[in-house]
Amino acid sequence: MKTNLPTLPAAPPVALDPSVVCPPCGLCCKHVAVDIGAPTSVQGVSTALWLVYHRGVSIYQDHDGDWFLLVPTDCGNLLPDGLCAVYHDRPLVCRDYDVDGCEGTSAEPAEKVRFDDAASLVAWLARKRPALYRRCVEKGVVPEALRPRP
């Protein structure tokens, strides 16, 4: 015997209030982060150095091990109150952003490691990836002035 289960009425579309979904800090709207390859080869290190040679540009590794280019810049849709002017029509990258792990709701920084300049990247590389650091020195990727002194 087949039982007919009750069906719920169709719910009207609900307009989400961004101030309920998102803390109105706007931190995620004050930079652009683009996925980049990890500096795990001489070429990768060379590219990472080239990126951080540019003033105001950083790179970082998140807690999942992914690497990003970080460019500080405000979104043109960020309102003075920290909310989004196009929230209901925002890009998919914004819709997919996990508010539970964002800068505004987590005490943990987004980055596991961050490099704001070439010197900090080279120092980290020499300390954490010594074999790769030596290959980069041999290939002439790491300038003498950036090499840590013994």
Image: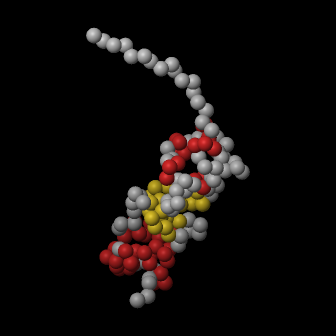
Q: Nearer the viewer, residue 58 or 63?
A: 63
Q: Position of residue 47 (x, y in %)?
A: 44, 66
From this viewpoint, is residue 76 visible?
no
Residue 23 sits above or below residue 4 on the image: below
At 58% from the left edge and 30% from the top edge, which residue is drawn? 14
Residue depicted at x 72% and y 51%: 80
Residue 8 screen position, x and y as percent: 47, 20
Residue at the image point whose x is 50% and y is 55% from the top = 34
Relative depth, front residue between 36 and 16 = 16
Give me the residue at 53% from left, 65% from top. 58
Image quarter for residue 17? Answer: top right
Task: Where is residue 143? Give x, y as percent.
Answer: 46, 80
Instruction: Name the residue at the top extreme.
Output: 1
Residue 73 in sight here: yes
Q: Is residue 133 above or below residue 25?
A: below
The residue positioned farthest toward the bottom in the image shown: 150
In the picture, which quadrant includes the N terminus? top left
Relative horizontal placement of residue 54, taking residue 1 as reference (left or right):
right
Front in this rendered view, residue 8 or 50: 8
- On the image, the x and y values in percent for residue 26 come to 62, 52
Q: Residue furthest right?
A: 80
